[in-house]
Image (spheres, rainbow, N blue to C red):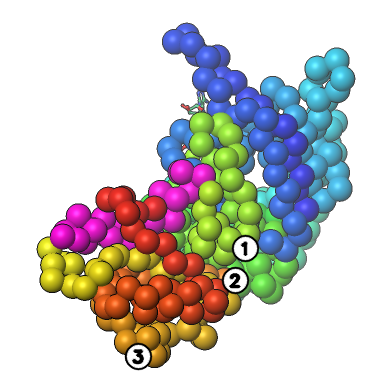
Amino acid sequence: MIVIKNLSKVYHLKSGDVTALENVSMTVQEGEIFGVIGNSGAGKSTLVRCINLLELPDSGSVTVNGTTLFQTEENGTLVVLPEKELNRQRRQIGMIFQHFNLLDRSTVFDNVAYPLKYSGLTRKEIRRRVGELLELVDLKDKASVYPSQLSGGQKQRVAIARALANNPRVLLSDEATSALDPDATESILQLLEKLNRELGLTIVIITHEMAVIRAICDKVAVMEQGHVVECGDTYRIFSRPRAEITRRFVSSTSGFSQADKLIARWDEILAGKENGAFYLLLFTRDSLSQATVSRISREYGVDLDILLANIELLRGGSIGRMLVAASGNGESIQAALRDLKQHHVEVREVTGYAVD
Ligand SMILES: Nc1ncnc2c1ncn2[C@@H]1O[C@H](COP(=O)(O)OP(=O)(O)OP(=O)(O)O)[C@@H](O)[C@H]1O
Ligand SMILES: [Mg+2]
């Protein structure tokens, strides 16, 4: 478990101070895949670098698996664990990066063996451990090649094997898939999910892509300008985003940013329709299987033209969104909408030109 409390960090530059983190607090439960999303400059990398003290924060505390790595005392001084103990704790935390950070002049085997150098293991034990790790990331046949001979996805697998060499309980991933194509991204995310499932590894994923969060995260914290603006269960964040920036992130992957184009043409689309209006329907895991638009349309004699629809698959369940143009008898439309609401479908009449 990782408990982060009131973490703050200001960079002092000639051009002025930059507040990278201001009173950031969050708790990552053991065995969780926890996402941190935010735009460029939001403070994500600073946060993750402060967790394992690659960066020294100004104040706050971080506790990993019950051991406090650093904390601010009442007089304001930051007290850090003694170096030897800190290094022992750091071995419990693996880290992977966007650009892999491999040793280019060393083979895959040597890259993975590198963190085991001072582990006290014999050569034979190291060989066995590296073999296990390469097997785990599906790169057994690449032990003797050099990083330049690997694809991006394979390089990231080597980096993951290296990060896991000392059996950490936590893996920090800073934009690990940002330099990869969609197929490689997918396979790395699947690998991370497997490591979480099979090893019980706690994973903190830093990303600027909501699709990464949607694919594997249990929880998510949304950061903006050094602050956590929203934090919660991924399913809740996707179905009911609260902060403005979270809404933007959600609509960037839901495909519903396109709804604006249709809404802008509503005069044309609704022309000649009796009581025509646009509605946005949100189907959650409570309503997806129960309420079908075709049944409602049939039962109430209401025309519901589906203009845009999608279903997103999340770890916690599915979310469906639909933009419909309804028309027919006014009372029947209202009765149909009430029926949908009774089946836990969120119904929103579109009255403006923007969809969030
Ligand atoms: N070493 C540094 N010296 C000075 N300022 C820094 C340093 N590192 C980060 N910053 C500043 O702190 C802020 C947060 O940066 P950070 O790298 O944490 O953002 P980020 O969310 O990881 O962004 P990105 O998505 O681009 O990686 C930015 O304004 C950045 O310019
Ligand atoms: Mg970053």
Residue beneath the point at 85% across and 44% down? 67
Magenta stretch in the rendered image: 243-267
Residue drawn where x is 59% and y is 21% of the image? 10
Neighbour tally class for label 3: few under 14, some 14-19, many 20 plus, Cα within 10 Å:
few
Q: Which amino acid does label 2 sit on?
A: Gly
Report x, y in % for residue 175.
48, 49
Image position of 347 with respect to 292: above or below: above
Q: Is residue 300 left or right of residue 114?
A: left
* Residue 181 against residue 99 in the figure, above or below: below
| Circle 3 residue | 298
In this rendering, the label closer to the viewer, 2 or 1: 2
Between 203 and 115, the one nearer to me in the picture: 203
Residue identifier under label 1: 218
Front label number (1 vs 3): 3
Looking at the image, which residue is at 69% across and 22% down?
58
- Can you give x and y, in whole percent of width and height, for residue 33 in the image? 63, 60
Residue 267 picture quarter: bottom left
Q: How crowded is mark 2: few (under 14 residues within 10 Å), some or many (20 or more)?
A: some
Name the one closer to the observer, 328 or 186. Answer: 328
Q: Is mark 2 on a helix, strand or loop?
A: loop
Q: Is residue 230 left or right of residue 170?
A: left
Question: In the rendered structure, are the residues bearing label 2 and label 1 in contact, judged by CB atoms less than 8 Å apart?
Answer: yes
Q: Which amino acid does label 3 sit on?
A: Arg
- Determine which of the numbered discs, if any, sits on residue 316 in the image: 2
Q: Does the residue labelled 2 lie within 8 Å of ligand 1?
A: no
